[in-house]
Image (cartoon, rainbow, N blue to C red):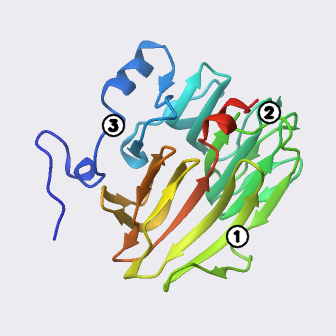
Amino acid sequence: MAPARRRGKPPALAMLGPPPYVGDREYRKTRSGTMKLHADLSKRAVVLSDDLPWRDSPLPGVQRRMLERDGEEVARATSIVRYAPNSSFSPHSHGGGEEFLVLEGVFSDEHGDFGPGSYVRNPPGSKHTPRSAPGCTIFVKLRQMTPDDTETVRIDTARASWQPGPVEGASHLPLYAGPAERVGLVRFAPGTQGSRHSHPGGEEIFVLEGTLADEHGRYPKGSWVRNPPGSEHAPFSDEGCLFYIKSGHLAPQAAAAVG
């Protein structure tokens, strides 16, 4: 059965379940210059990134779709970042670390070239000069690591070995595990029904392929979902899907420790 549409919302948003949606009050705050976008980590947030405008960064050829942000240009942030062909960003360091997944194209810096599916963690204090010759799009999280997170991670997920998941039809690719968080990719075959579970330290999802769903809504490719600490759900997928998942990092003690 197709999901019911809410009066006054476009069909894409009607798929996403309960608000808040970007485009309402928090989006107007961002336009007013306060740079507070889904900044309350204790609240659920759902964003369909493909519906967001591309916003220019301070450097030409680099644009962003902002999913969450707390701060000005230097900020705790989760974004989709697009590099035009032959564009670059100025040299910079990561005071609170950087984590990204290459969605398309090739992202480059002095440490290497990273194609689609590359997962990278640059710990607090790391430096680089990003660029892209063919252009690229990345899912990136900034200033969300604790000061004692010193591990550099480089994984080509296209060549990595997947593990069986906890239910039939699910598989899992671990990307990082630390005291405060776990990160991985999860694939659901068509018709997979996940078990009901809670998120003591919160959970964050970005859908890479297909459509993920639960009792709260349906989340097509490009959906970003933040489920706060204490939330629970039973995820499933009729058509199959692939998604990035991070858990544990939203617990108050973990969030407070972020540099």
Q: Residue furthest bottom?
A: 168
Q: Is residue 60 visible?
A: no
Residue named by callout 2: 94
Label located before the other in sequence (2 or 1): 2
On screen, residue 240 versus residue 11, left or right, reads right
Residue neighbourhood size for the residue with mark 1, other residues' Cα within 10 Å, grouped as few (<14), some (14–19), many (≥20):
some
Residue placed at 80% from the left, 29% from the top? 95
* Residue 76 pos. (x, y %): 63, 30
The residue wearing badge 3 is 20
Helix, strand or loop for disc 3: loop
Q: Amino acid at mark 1?
A: Thr
Residue 208 x/y as whole percent: 51, 62
Image marks 3 and 1: residues in contact by CB distance under 8 Å: no
State which tag comes first along the sequence, 2 or 3. 3
Residue drawn at (78%, 30%) of the image: 90
Q: Quadrant of residue 232?
A: bottom left
71 relative to 199, above or below: above
Q: Secondary structure at mark 1?
A: loop
Between residues 35 and 103, which one lies in front from this camera angle? Answer: 35
Quadrant location of the C terminus? Answer: top right
Residue drawn where x is 51% and y is 20% of the image = 35
| Quadrant in the picture for residue 59 | top right
Amino acid type, label 2: His
Q: Residue furthest left?
A: 7
Q: For mark 2, does the 10 Å Cα neighbourhood hold few (<14), some (14 to 19), or many (20 or more) residues? A: some
Q: Disc 3 vs disc 1: which is toward the camera?
A: 3
Image location (x, y in percent) of residue 69: 55, 29
